[in-house]
Amino acid sequence: MSLLGRDVIAVRDLSRDDIEEVLAASKRMIPYAEGRKSSTLLEGKILVLAFFEPSTRTRLSFDSAMQRLGGRTITIADPASTSVRKGETLHDTIRMISQYGDAVVLRHPNEGAARLAAKVSERPVVNAGDGAGQHPTQTLLDLATILEACGTLSGLKVVLLGDLRHGRTVHSLAYALALFGSQIVLVSPPTLRLPEEVRTQLDELGAKVVDEMPLPQAVRDADVLYVTRIQRERFGDDAEYAKVVGSYRVDLALLAKAKPRLIVMHPLPRTVEIAPEVDATPHAAYFRQAFQAVPVRMALLALLLKGSAK
Ligand code: NCD
């Protein structure tokens, strides 16, 4: 099935073929994403960026991706400046703003918001993060980063470290890794384990999942170490956050016994979970990962809005 006109709400809405199509197109987009070549593929198209939660990379990379392809963007970056402030519902906001462009990229604090938006939107909706739910386009760029560094998405050992309970990037990524047949090792503080429903989805895919081994042991034969921050904004009270903050940290001592080709990834922003000393090592892949946001989102937008990225 072509991606033209589809909504992208969760990774499980995408087939392996869909994902492979985006990744192949993304590779071809790299010279355009770097500004070495120019394109008018999406000239005349308007992308609505509706961000009801803070964002740096996701919003700017969607904006850059659209503009690199000759399209334009209109943006809600500060919900306090919109009629939401006057009590407008998400339903009404989406129904209306979807008429102002050719697709809507939505980030919202409520889990399920993007699915709801897709029901009322007249145009394709892309989920750019719904609370502690899903973040499928982050997964696409995570996969592009892994593929570029490791040459494959199958048969790898990937450690997911950190706040697996609230981290939407890991919810989406775990599903994709299972789809491609990589092994998943979960390492988190005991109160921040992967939610049951995500585990169930992995089991249904027949995923190879290993639980909670000590971090140094998990890192020793890993190909990818995917680190996440503790999602402070999802905690009801700060005392709970204070109990877990700083409970894990990736530094040179931890990486001393890792495989030379291990890559350390992070969706960013980082807080304290990766020591800055790691940045200068060949393991650090997180800044390249942040760059991949542009070609991957270019590929996805082209496929959604034109049905082709050529
Ligand atoms: C992530 C998010 O918003 O879920 N950031 C991002 O999109 N790169 C991760 C995070 O905020 O920790």
Image (cartoon, grey):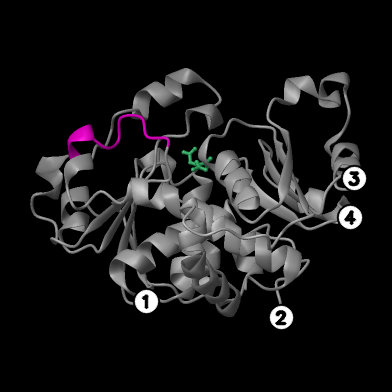
Magenta span dominant secondary structure:
loop
Closer mark to the observer between disc 1 and disc 2? 2
SS for tag 2?
loop
- Lower sequence index among marks 1 and 2: 2
- Lower sequence index among marks 4 and 1: 4
For residue 69, what is the image quadrant? bottom right
Residue 154's label in the rendered image is 1
Q: CA distance from mark 4 to mark 3?
A: 7 Å
Residue 95's label in the rendered image is 3
Kind of residue sitting beneath label 4: Glu
- Lower sequence index among marks 4 and 3: 3
- Classify 10 Å Cα crowding around label 2: few (below 14), some (14-19), many (20 and above): few
What residue appears at the point 86 percent right and 24 percent down from the top-left corner?
83
Residue 1's label in the rendered image is 2
The magenta stretch is 269-278
- Lower sequence index among marks 1 and 3: 3
Taking depth in this image into account, of 156 and 3 the one nearest to the observer is 3
